[in-house]
């Protein structure tokens, strides 16, 4: 009988290491196979909660926030592109020129949790931003992602055109900050074990096998 395991994946849809971490985690789960029954919960985290809707030039933003020079940024992008390729994901850096506000994306993800399609929506949002260079604050982008994830478009639109789940998302963001989460991805297994960062599949696999053995 498969061992149930809860996975809280705290992340932002504009975080490249969150893509890498999720893909690596899924690879680890595939390697382990039917011995585990994972239950994903995607939790909200905004890297830039005060970002205006029109966004900011990404090179300018990273220089301001992290002090990274253009050369350092290019080295980082090359690393991210390679790590993405290693887990089967395409980072089209030439299409992604701005950082955007992601609050509405988190509201939509929160709504999608009860539909059973939350993970599909997360993947669609990552692809929209990082591969296609689309604006994840734009409702048409979010609706295309919802459609790709197999969600009810009318219901998704109703969420976006209202303030639904705004309070819930802010409460959850506050909760994870109170738990000491200040960078993402943060992967919490069975509400006890924290794995931080876009780790390789081998590390996730080893940790999951050990946690499952202790249950």
Image: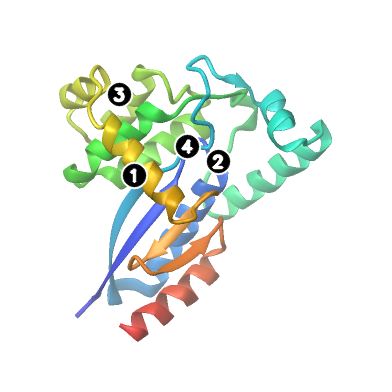
Q: Earlier in the sequence, mark 3 or mark 1?
A: 3
- At x 16%, y 22%, the residue is 154
Foreground: 90 or 154? 154
Q: How far, Cα to Cα, is label 2 from label 1?
A: 30 Å
Q: Where 15 sits versus 207, above or below?
A: above
Q: Where 161 sits versus 65, above or below?
A: above
Across and down, in percent, residue 67 comes to: 77, 35
Q: How far, Cα to Cα, is label 3 from label 1?
A: 23 Å
Q: Residue furthest front?
A: 178
Q: Is residue 149 visible?
A: no
Q: Which residue is mark 4?
A: 46
Q: Quadrant of residue 59?
A: top right
Q: Which mark is residue 172?
A: 1
Across and down, in percent, residue 204 comes to: 48, 68
For the residues bearing labels 3 and 1, Cβ distance under 8 angstroms:
no
Q: Is residue 40 left or right of residue 48?
A: left
Q: Which mark is residue 90?
A: 2
Q: Which mark is residue 54?
A: none
Across and down, in percent, residue 93 comes to: 63, 32
Q: Earlier in the sequence, mark 4 or mark 2?
A: 4
Q: Is residue 198 left or right of residue 152?
A: right
Q: Which residue is mark 3?
A: 143
Q: How far, Cα to Cα, is label 2 from label 3?
A: 21 Å
Q: Quadrant of residue 137?
A: top left
Q: Earlier in the sequence, mark 2 or mark 3?
A: 2
Secondary structure of the residue carrying tag 1 is: helix
Q: How far, Cα to Cα, is label 1 from label 4?
A: 11 Å
For the residues bearing labels 1 and 4, Cβ distance under 8 angstroms:
no
Q: Earlier in the sequence, mark 1 or mark 4?
A: 4
From the image, state whether disc 2 or disc 3 is nearer to you: 3
Q: Quadrant of residue 124?
A: top left
Q: Residues within 10 Å of mark 3 (few under 14, many from 20)?
A: many
């Amino acid at each position: 009988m498969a061992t149930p395991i809860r996975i809280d994946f705290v992340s932002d849809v504009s975080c490249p290491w969150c893509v890498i971490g999720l893909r690596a985690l899924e690879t680890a789960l595939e390697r382990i196979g039917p011995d585990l029954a994972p239950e994903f919960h995607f939790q909200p985290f905004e890297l830039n909660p005060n970002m205006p809707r029109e966004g900011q030039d990404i090179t300018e933003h990273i220089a301001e926030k992290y002090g990274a020079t253009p050369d350092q940024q290019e080295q980082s992008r090359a690393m991210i592109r390679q790590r993405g390729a290693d887990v089967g994901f395409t980072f089209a850096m030439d299409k992604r020129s701005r950082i955007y506000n992601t609050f509405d994306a988190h509201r939509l993800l929160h709504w999608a949790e009860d539909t059973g399609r939350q993970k599909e929506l997360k993947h669609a949002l990552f692809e929209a931003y990082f591969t296609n260079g689309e604006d994840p604050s734009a409702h048409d982008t979010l609706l295309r992602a919802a459609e790709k994830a197999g969600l009810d478009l009318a219901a998704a639109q109703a969420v976006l055109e209202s303030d639904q789940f705004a309070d819930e998302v802010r409460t959850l963001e506050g909760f994870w900050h109170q738990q000491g989460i200040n960078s993402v991805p943060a992967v919490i297994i069975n509400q006890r074990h924290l794995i931080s960062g876009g780790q390789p599949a081998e590390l996730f696999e080893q940790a999951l096998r050990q946690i499952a053995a202790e249950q």
